[in-house]
Amino acid sequence: MRWNGISASVTMALLCPLMLAATGCQTTVGGQTLPSPYYLKDDVQYYPAGPEFKLSNQVQALEEYKLEREKLRAGVDDEAQ
């Protein structure tokens, strides 16, 4: 009877970590989110930080437009004289 208890304990001690390692899902332990065993094989989605001012292209286009208008007006003013 005692041998059966020891063999059951050894079997459980060997099988429990194996079953836990084979699950492959995220778990939360003590407030920490722990990754799955496959996190090293996962593709990382990285989005680099963009500019602080989101409308920088629009501002640049407006400034170029204003410069072009000033050049055209200056050209029209030169022809009028």
Image (cartoon, grey):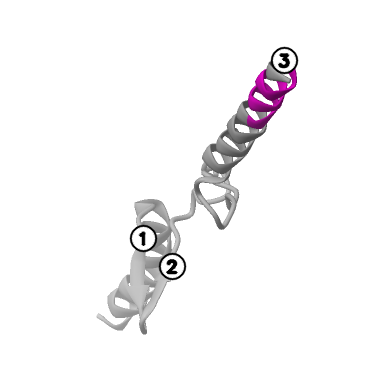
Residue drawn at 65 percent across, 31 percent down: 70
Mark 1 / mark 2, whichever is N-terminal: 1
The quarter in which the N terminus is drawn is bottom left
Identified at 34% across, 77% down, the residue is: 3
Identify the secondary structure beneath mark 2.
Answer: strand
Cα distance in 3D space between marks 3 and 2: 74 Å
Residue 15 tag number: none
Q: Which residue is mark 3?
A: 79
Q: Residue furthest top?
A: 79
Q: Are marks 1 and 2 in contact (CB under 8 Å)?
A: yes
Seen in the image, is 24 located left or right of residue 45? Answer: left
Badge 2 is on which residue? 34
Placement of 30 over or under 54, stated as above or below: below
Say few, some or many: other residues with alpha carbon within 10 Å of mark 1 (under 14 / 14 to 19 / 20 or more): few
Say which residue label 1 marks: 26
* The one of 43 and 71 positioned closer to us in this rendering: 71
Snapshot quadrant of residue 27: bottom left
Precedes in sequence: disc 3 or disc 1: 1
In magenta, the rendered stretch is 70-78
Residue type pointed to by label 1: Gln
* Amino acid at the residue labelled 2: Leu
Is 6 or 81 nearer to us in this picture? 81
The majority secondary structure of the magenta stretch comes to: helix
